């Protein structure tokens, strides 16, 4: 379970720090108390503890600001909460739901199937030897989709990694400043290739490559990485921040590099 959900005090601390981040720098302890459902005195004590721990700094009377350490703690805690929520919806509630998988061979309804993840998609094979199993709810021929329910077990999954390569904006040379051969080399074999920004798209085309998507690159990469796929994003420098924000929001590992 996420640390902030382990006990009431940890959850309250998380909520109060979130409220401070939302209202800073002018912070009304009374408003936070109403929002969180505790007394103003309790809010004062929590804020004192947050200041002592270096997560909040006091700038004056009723003026507080979340520190960099506080932001990092909030982001990590929010990621932990999200993962726990995903566990509840996917692993727990998903057991009573139904999902679709690609049949690796012909499958009859009612058959026990082993569930695996390949290329970011669920696949089903007759048998119960897999780490995760389910019951087929439909007949399916090889290569078509099959309904699966009554999931048990956990699918082995190593999250993917995202690498973001920067292309300068047009005012700084744009795609013309990129070595096409070097770009082709770093993108070679990427399961998912995304681009954001005109300069990035043109740089890839000059290297003889077509991106899988040119929209919402960060969000697409985050989902692909969560399904075990490595992703390469080529992004105009001006848009790198938007891409990495989307990756940080879900806790996906990434690095930003230059084409060399």
Image: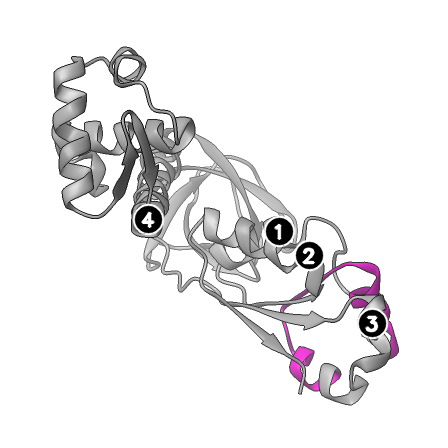
Q: Is residue 73 left or right of residue 23?
A: left
Where is mark 1, residue-wise?
Answer: 242
Looking at the image, is mark 2 or mark 4 nearer the viewer?
A: 2
First along the sequence among labels 2 and 4: 4
Q: CA distance from mark 1 to mark 4?
A: 18 Å
For the residues bearing labels 3 and 4, Cβ distance under 8 angstroms: no
Element assignment for label 4: helix
Element assignment for label 1: helix
First along the sequence among labels 3 and 1: 3
Q: CA distance from mark 2 to mark 3?
A: 13 Å
- Say which quarter of the image contains residue 238: bottom right
Give the answer, above or below, for where 9 lies relative to 203: above
The image's mark for residue 174 is 3
Where is mark 2, residue-wise?
Answer: 239
Q: Is residue 126 left or right of residue 10?
A: right
Q: CA distance from mark 1 to mark 2?
A: 6 Å
First along the sequence among labels 2 and 3: 3
For the residues bearing labels 1 and 2, Cβ distance under 8 angstroms: yes
């Amino acid at each position: 379970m996420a640390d902030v959900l382990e006990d009431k005090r940890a959850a309250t601390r998380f909520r109060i720090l979130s409220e401070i981040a939302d209202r800073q720098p002018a912070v009304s302890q009374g408003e936070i108390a109403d929002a969180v459902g505790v007394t103003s005195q309790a809010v004062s004590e929590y804020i004192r503890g947050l200041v002592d721990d270096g997560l909040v700094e006091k700038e004056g009377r009723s003026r507080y600001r979340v520190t960099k350490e506080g932001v990092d703690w909030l982001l990590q805690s929010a990621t932990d909460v999200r993962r726990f929520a995903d566990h509840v919806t996917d692993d727990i509630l998903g057991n009573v739901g139904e999902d679709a998988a690609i049949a690796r061979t012909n499958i009859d309804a009612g058959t026990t199937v082993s569930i695996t993840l390949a290329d970011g998609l669920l696949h089903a094979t007759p048998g119960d030897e897999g780490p995760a199993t389910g019951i087929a709810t439909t007949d399916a021929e090889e290569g078509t989709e099959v309904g699966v329910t009554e999931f048990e077990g956990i699918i082995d999954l190593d999250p993917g990694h995202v690498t973001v390569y920067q292309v300068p904006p047009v005012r700084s040379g744009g795609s013309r400043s990129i070595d096409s051969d070097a770009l082709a080399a770093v993108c070679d074999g990427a399961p998912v290739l995304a681009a954001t920004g005109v300069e990035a798209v043109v740089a890839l085309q000059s290297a003889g490559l077509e991106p899988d998507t040119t929209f919402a690159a960060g969000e697409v990469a985050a989902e692909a990485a969560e399904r075990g796929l490595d992703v390469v994003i080529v992004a105009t420098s001006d848009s790198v921040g938007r891409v990495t924000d989307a990756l940080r929001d879900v806790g996906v590992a990434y690095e930003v590099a230059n084409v060399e």
